[in-house]
Amino acid sequence: MTAPVLGIEDLSVSYTTPHGPLQAVSGVDLSVGPGEIVGIIGESGCGKSTLVAAIMGMLPGSARIGSGAIRFGGRDLVGLPREEMRKLRGGGLALVSQNPMTAFNPVHTIGRQLTDFQHREGVSNAVKRARITDMFDQVGITDPSRRLHAYPHEFSGGMLQRMAIAAALLTRPQLIIADEPTTALDVTLEAQIIALLRRTRDEQGCSILFVSHHLGAVAQLCDRVLVMYAGVVVEAAPVAELFRHPAHPYTQRLLACDPALDAGGDQPLPTIAGQVPNLVNPPEGCRFAPRCLCATGRCVRERPQPVELAPAHAAACHLVAP
Amino acid sequence: MIAAEHLGVRVRPGLSAAALLRGHLPKPLDILIDVSLAIAPGETLALVGESGSGKTTLGRTLNGLVRPVTGVVRFEGEVLGPRASDRQLRPLRHRVAMIFQDAVGSLDPRLRVRDLVTEPLRIQRIRPEPDAAEKLLAQVGLPEALAERYPHELSGGQARRVTVARNLAVPPRLIICDEPTAGLDVSVQAEIVNLLVELQRRLAIAYLVITHDLAVARRMSRRIAVMYLGSIVETGPTAEVFAQPRHPYSRALFLAEPSRDPAQRHPPPLDGEVPSLQQRPSGCVFQTRCPHVQDLCRQAAPEEREIAPGHLLRCHFPLGEDPA
């Protein structure tokens, strides 16, 4: 296998709180290969956003990277000087955020902002503008030259999300991190954006790390999926394998309680009783043990290590057999 | 029990000095056009459609928060039209409850949960029993200890439950649930759906479930209405409409829902976006995006007609028996 574009090894991030350090991400391993679309699914508080912020070097001051490495472009991003990190953002690494409405500066035209994004290119503004109209064409924005003079508020959410993707592509990224890019969009637009991201990968060959809590979007877009719970990766598998043979009890419950997979009938939908554990004092053993229906004494005492079940399919659970 | 007949809602955008100086008077916008629906006691009707289709405005009109410019709302013998007075609307507002989309935002941040859930009683000058708050919280599965908390101390799911409890204080005939599961985690969504279904079974409340989540609509409702750009384009039994949508928009909407099966990946069913209300298409509202558009669709708006018992459609060329 060729070297991954992004390789995260044993990453742990904690936040300082009045009650002690909150362990938001604990020992996460993750790799994204060239041209691969990797999905991260998880519910609120599972550490998705912290992970994204850590990769982008945008963790708040209260956060501390306890251990681990984030390898990108032959370098470890952990401890990289600010100036070096700044050069990577928009130069190799691009972020498409959840809310397209706040991704742009409201007081400058779209054209001005997308021209500025290319400040590293060293070409004339006319060339930059030509690149923008080209890119607009690719992401399905009609009448591109007129759009350059418009302000962000003149566009709909779906249109702005296309522009955010165009903006990311203008910087010729090796890796696009898409953080819940379809959450704020309607379902027919969501389908369009998913198709656009897939086409982007096919045509530009860039890798995508797609973070979402929407199981359907992940199933439609990703090649490989990681499931996070309470700061740890509980399962990683190729997408078809994950949806067909989920191995970790959390993944199984999560898939079961999705209303979209409901067969109908009068039975109540399955739920996951209990709450995500407090990560200031996380459970000693498996973090899902307090809510797991099949937890044993060992699950409570001992933290499970990933068990390889099939090629590229691993689950961190004492109860799964290889 | 409650019926809307040929409702039309129009708003006049705010006047701005700049527009007046240039001599522009803002054109009134039609948010709803000729919308009719009926909800029977204890039944659930789901209302689906994309942002801007008028789902929330329709809900607010049924609740008396918005006055229609045409049409009437019939509720328990009252006929409430464009000129209904506040006094006439009062029974509607008292017996038709509403769960707002932004659960935390709909709760007064300065009140404790105890006072929030009993507030409707005080508004109606009913003296709450000493344990009224605890009883209401128990009905929605919240522990008594929560009674002393403020809204910002609640999780999304808990806040949603508190808004339900508030609505039960004065027993309603109908609850309008505006996006009851939006913004919640998958497992919490399931909890809220279960709660609403169970309350309905126990208290025989009718629901209008406004949602963009087709799975929630399918789960909770017997009948479904599909809205697009201020019109209901299709209404019918939920199972029938999902199995065989007859309106091209219903079909596209259902196809756009991302499948959980990675083996089933298909291209997006619709290009483009919902047109702006300021540029409402002539003829059929869906003609600018409809894959089967014909000349007639551009010229004349289709009338609503019944194509099967209880199945209403607004389309000149309904999809055939085999929508493949």
Image (tube, coloured by chain):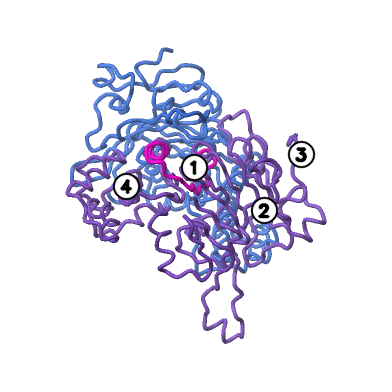
Any part of residue A319 in sight? yes
- Mark closer to the observer (3, 2): 3
Q: Is residue B315 left or right of residue A9?
A: right
- In which image quadrant can residue A51 be found? top left
Query: Which residue is the extreme one toward the top?
Result: A321
Q: Position of residue A202 (x, y in %)?
A: 65, 39
Instruction: Give, as a three-letter code, the residue at label 1.
Output: Glu
Q: CA distance from mark 4 to mark 2?
A: 41 Å
Evaluate if marks 3 and 1 touch, with contact meaning CB atoms under 8 Å apart. Answer: no
Mark positioned earlier in the residue sequence (3 or 2): 2
Marks 2 and 1, the one that precedes in the sequence = 1
Query: Element under label 1?
Result: loop
- Magenta residues (range): B195-216
Does mark 2 fall on the same chain as mark 3? yes
Q: Chain of mark 4?
A: B
Q: CA distance from mark 3 to mark 4?
A: 45 Å
SS label for mark 4: helix
- In whole angstroms, how far apart are the C-alphas of marks 3 and 2? 24 Å
Task: Check disc 1 and report the residue beneath it.
Answer: B43
- Tell me which residue sits at (61%, 43%) in the image: A191
Chain ID, mark 1: B
Tag 4 near tag 2, CB within 8 Å: no
**Do pointers 1 and 4 mark residues of a single chain?**
yes
Instruction: Tell me, by letter, which chain the rendering colours purple.
Output: B
Q: Is residue A118 magenta?
A: no
Query: x, y (%) of residue B21?
Result: 57, 87
* Foreground of the two, A226 or B72: B72
Residue holding disc 2: B272
